[in-house]
Amino acid sequence: MFNYSKLRGRIAEKYKQHAAFAKALGISTRSLSLKLTGKTEFRPSEIIKAIQLLELTNNDISAYFFTLKVQ
């Protein structure tokens, strides 16, 4: 399972609410919630779009989407 705390912080910083980011990403708020809680995975196309929307670089992908959750 991945730790999305850094991603959550960036979403809050840029979009204030998850609903606004989900809409910009083209998915439902429920789908975003499922992804952020690890119940479903982000598709590669969603990761690429999220990086653009959040004004990150390709070098940021691993830090925001693939940091393992410490148990």
Image (cartoon, rainbow, N blue to C red):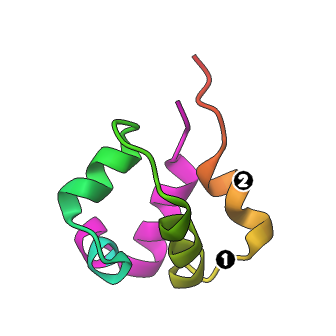
Residue 46 covered by magenta stretch = no
Up/down of 60 relative to 52, above or below: above
Up/down of 19 relative to 67, above or below: below
User: Which disc, if any, is residue 48?
Assistant: none
Q: Which residue matches tag 1?
A: 56
Question: How many residues crowd mark 2 within 10 Å: few (<14), some (14–19), many (20+)?
Answer: few
Label 1–label 2 contact, CB within 8 A: no
Name the secondary structure under disc 1: loop
Count of numbered marks: 2
Residue 42 falls left or right of residue 52: left
Q: Nearer the viewer, residue 9 or 36?
A: 36
Look at 28% across and 51% down and name the residue there.
33
Q: Position of residue 41 (x, y in %)?
A: 44, 46
Question: How many residues crowd mark 1 within 10 Å: few (<14), some (14–19), many (20+)?
Answer: some
Residue 12 covered by magenta stretch = yes
Q: Position of residue 14 (x, y in %)?
A: 46, 79
Q: Nearer the viewer, residue 68 or 9?
A: 68
Q: Which residue matches tag 2?
A: 62
Whichever of labels 1 and 2 marks the residue nearer the N terminus, that label is 1
- The segment highlighted magenta reads 1-20
Up/down of 6 relative to 16, above or below: above
Up/down of 46 relative to 62, above or below: below
Look at 52% across and 30% down and name the residue there.
1
Look at 31% across and 77% down and name the residue there.
26
Residue 47 falls left or right of residue 56: left
At label 1, which amino acid type do we have? Leu
Q: CA distance from mark 1 to mark 2?
A: 11 Å
Q: Quadrant of residue 37?
A: top left
Q: Position of residue 39 (x, y in %)?
A: 34, 36
At label 2, which amino acid type do we have? Ser
Name the magenta segment's main secondary structure: helix
